[in-house]
Amino acid sequence: MQLNPLAVSMLNLLVCGGIFFICFCRVIATDGRVLLRVRVKFCLIGGTAMWVGVSPMWGSYAGMEILSFTSSVAVGLLAETFQWRHGPPASVRVDTMPASLRRDL
Amino acid sequence: MTTPAAPYDIIALLTLAGGIIFSNPQLAEAVAPHAVVCFAALIGGLYALSRKTADQEMPNKRKKSAVFLLRIVGMALIVTIPAATLIAPHLGLEESRFLFAPLALLLGAIGDERKEFLEWCFSFVMRWKNPKQGE
């Protein structure tokens, strides 16, 4: 079955919009006390998700491969929702980390 | 010949709207450099947002953060391309477009902390010029 590339791109845009929203909500729940690598992770995932989502604007249509990858990223972020329900979990915060494991990055 | 029925499901409607917006090559050519600036500034702006103090009880936090991002991306859209055009000859670059993404990322990451960034740059330059005074 040959799917319309524009329809797949539109679905991809919706999924990428969801990824951006999740990353946006997590970014605003963080501050300097959260590990730098975790903050950078959500910034990059959120920003590039929007980039991929609107890429049809310059002729780069998403195929099923891109859609399945972005859907997997969305599921991965949703799977952590329980840990982030009250803000950053202790495992990513510098101030609650055991001293032996403490890394500011 | 009968005309095809209008789409009723949401995906078909989005596909139709997308086809109107996304299939214009002239639009794509005009939008592309600004899109690069926009998304680089978005990533930088998200990083600036992640540095701000997280007050879990602040009302309308999402709305304020969204306005912050819009402000940062808007500023980057206005400032980046002229700044890149001014800076590129001093760096020996023939085309300024190579600076769009890094400059937009930097402007987004600085966010509202322009004063702190300038102070840091000044102290970095002073330490670089006078290393003995920094010890």
Image (tube, coloured by chain):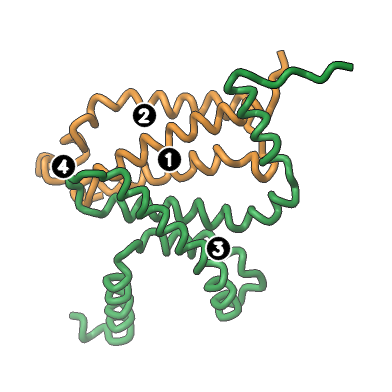
Pinpoint residue B79: horizontal percent, then vertical percent.
50, 69
| Mark 2 to mark 3 CA distance (whole Å) | 30 Å
The residue singled out by tag 4 in the image is B57
Q: Residues within 10 Å of mark 4 (few under 14, many from 20)?
A: few
Q: Earlier in the sequence, mark 4 or mark 3?
A: 4
Q: Secondary structure at mark 2?
A: helix
Q: Which chain is green?
A: B
The chain that hosts pointer 2 is A
Type of the residue with mark 1:
Ile
Pinpoint residue B92: horizontal percent, then vertical percent.
60, 77
Query: Relative to B54, is B4 on the left or the right?
Result: right
A55 versus B37 height, above or below: above
Q: Secondary structure at mark 3?
A: helix
The chain that hosts pointer 1 is A
Same chain check for tags 2 and 4: no
Q: Colour of chain A?
A: orange
**Circles 1 and 2: CB distance less than 8 Å?**
yes
The residue singled out by tag 2 in the image is A77
Tell me, for residue B100, which label it has, or none.
3
Type of the residue with mark 4:
Glu
Type of the residue with mark 3:
Phe
Q: Which residue is painted at 62% across and 73% down in the image? A: B93
Q: Which residue is painted at 55% across and 39% down in the image? A: A52
Same chain check for tags 1 and 2: yes
A12 versus B80 height, above or below: above
